[in-house]
Image: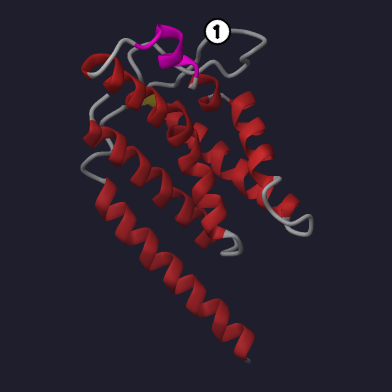
């Protein structure tokens, strides 16, 4: 996985989250966006970092390179959303959990559209290791669209926020 792909993937996930929030409710948009980024950050960043350590500094046990992968599967996403929501006050905890989980679900839906050369996603892990993906677009197909999508998403959220604040002022 190249760095360019990883950054474009994060940008498109975040931008898609902003578009969804602008179309629905801007409330807790940052938490929803964080939910779309967390599966990659929690699973890919440790794997990439440990892989670099393994190649350039010292050998790392192979299981450590892939131990983070369950955080990129539905069961791991639910667990991660739950644990992170516990860091918030009890009053907003349910909303934080649902927004994180909603963002993670959007992340998974976007990832399922991609082709990962047959690797796919273990949607029923830990109960099954069968993998699935739709394979409709290449995993690097979002690279050219990432920045324009981010600009559009920010514009859309700002427009939605302005219209919501105008309604509240009336």
The image shows residue 153, relative to residue 136, as above or below, that is below
In the rendered image, residue 123 lying in the magenta stretch gets the answer no
Q: Residue furthest right?
A: 90
The image shows residue 12, relative to residue 60, as above or below, that is below
Quick one: SS at disc 1? loop
Q: Is residue 105 left or right of residue 82?
A: left
Residue at x 40%, y 51% (from the top left corner):
15
The image shows residue 41, relative to residue 92, as above or below, that is above
Q: Which span is picked out in magenta?
A: 60-67
Residue at x 42%, y 49% (from the top left corner):
14
- Give the residue pinned by disc 1: 130
Toward which corner of the image does residue 82 lie, by quadrant? top right
Q: Is residue 64 left or right of residue 138?
A: right
Tell me the colour scheme of the image: secondary structure
On the image, the x and y values in percent for residue 67 come to 49, 16
On the image, the x and y values in percent for residue 41 come to 43, 36
The image shows residue 111, relative to residue 63, as above or below, that is below
**Mark 1 nearby-residue class (10 Å; few <14, some 14–19, many ≥20):** few
């Amino acid at each position: 996985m190249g760095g360019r792909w990883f950054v474009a993937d994060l940008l498109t996930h975040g931008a898609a989250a902003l578009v969804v929030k602008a179309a629905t409710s801007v409330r807790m948009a940052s938490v929803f966006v964080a939910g779309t980024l967390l599966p990659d950050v929690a699973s890919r960043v440790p794997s990439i970092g440990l892989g670099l350590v393994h190649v350039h500094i010292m050998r790392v046990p192979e299981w450590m390179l892939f131990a983070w992968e369950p955080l990129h599967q539905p069961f791991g996403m639910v667990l991660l959303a739950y644990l992170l929501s516990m860091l918030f006050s009890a009053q907003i905890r349910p909303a934080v959990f649902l927004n994180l989980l909603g963002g993670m679900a959007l992340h998974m839906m976007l990832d399922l559209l991609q082709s990962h050369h047959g690797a796919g996603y273990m949607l029923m892990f830990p109960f099954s290791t069968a993998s699935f993906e739709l394979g409709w677009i290449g995993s690097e197909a979002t690279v050219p669209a990432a920045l324009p999508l981010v600009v559009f998403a920010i514009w859309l959220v700002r427009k939605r926020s302005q219209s919501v604040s105008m309604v509240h002022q009336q």
